[in-house]
Amino acid sequence: MPPITSADVTVTVSAPDRDIGGGGVFKNITLASIAFGNGTLTYPTGGVPLPAIGNFGYKRELKFVGIQEPSANGFVYKYDDAAHTIKIFTQGFKTGPTTVATNENGALVLNSAGAEAAAPRMPKTAIDTVYDTGGLIELPATVAPAAATLKLLLFGE
């Protein structure tokens, strides 16, 4: 499957939300929304590339982009100003260096959709229990995220 490109990202800025600072500040302040993902295009390594800043109403630069997270899709979204991308993070874990002594049975793991599959099992775990498995990881490039719409607060010129 091909990755999401900036051409696959829809930017919407309504007239009342453009330059809401009204000239009273030295930077423009804009509210925008972006929509991307369709379950068939994969997450690109390094993040979802955004269209040019002109699509958001800016000519020179973006100084800050804040993101209002969607209500409950389980992902965390961060703006990468150096790459002008939206990075998506999910819960993941990394196994330690200890050699596996036995393949002990354990509870089945729930995926991001909350579905339980035949694998993987986490050895020495109990059913219906939450474990701290470490920090967030960037979404793997093999994942095709479902449609998402994010609200953005942008400051720039």
Image (spheres, grey):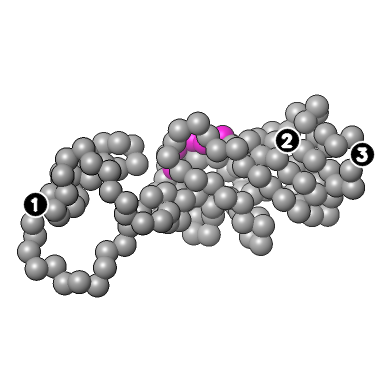
The three-letter code of the residue at mark 3 reads Gly
The three-letter code of the residue at mark 2 reads Leu
Which residue carries the number 3 mark?
24
Which residue carries the number 2 mark?
31
Which residue carries the number 1 mark?
105
The residue under the point 16% across, 49% down is: 125
Q: Residue 87 location in percent, x, y? A: 54, 52
Q: Element at badge 1?
A: loop
Residue 101 to residue 155: above or below: below
Q: In the image, which is nearer the foreground, mark 3 or mark 2?
A: 3
The answer to if 147 sits in the magenta stretch is yes
Mark 3 or mark 1, earlier in chain: 3
Mark 3 or mark 2, earlier in chain: 3
Residue contact between numbered discs 3 and 1, judged by CB atoms under 8 Å:
no
State left or right for residue 114 relative to residue 55: left
Q: How far apart are marks 3 and 1 (CA)?
A: 63 Å
The three-letter code of the residue at mark 1 reads Asn
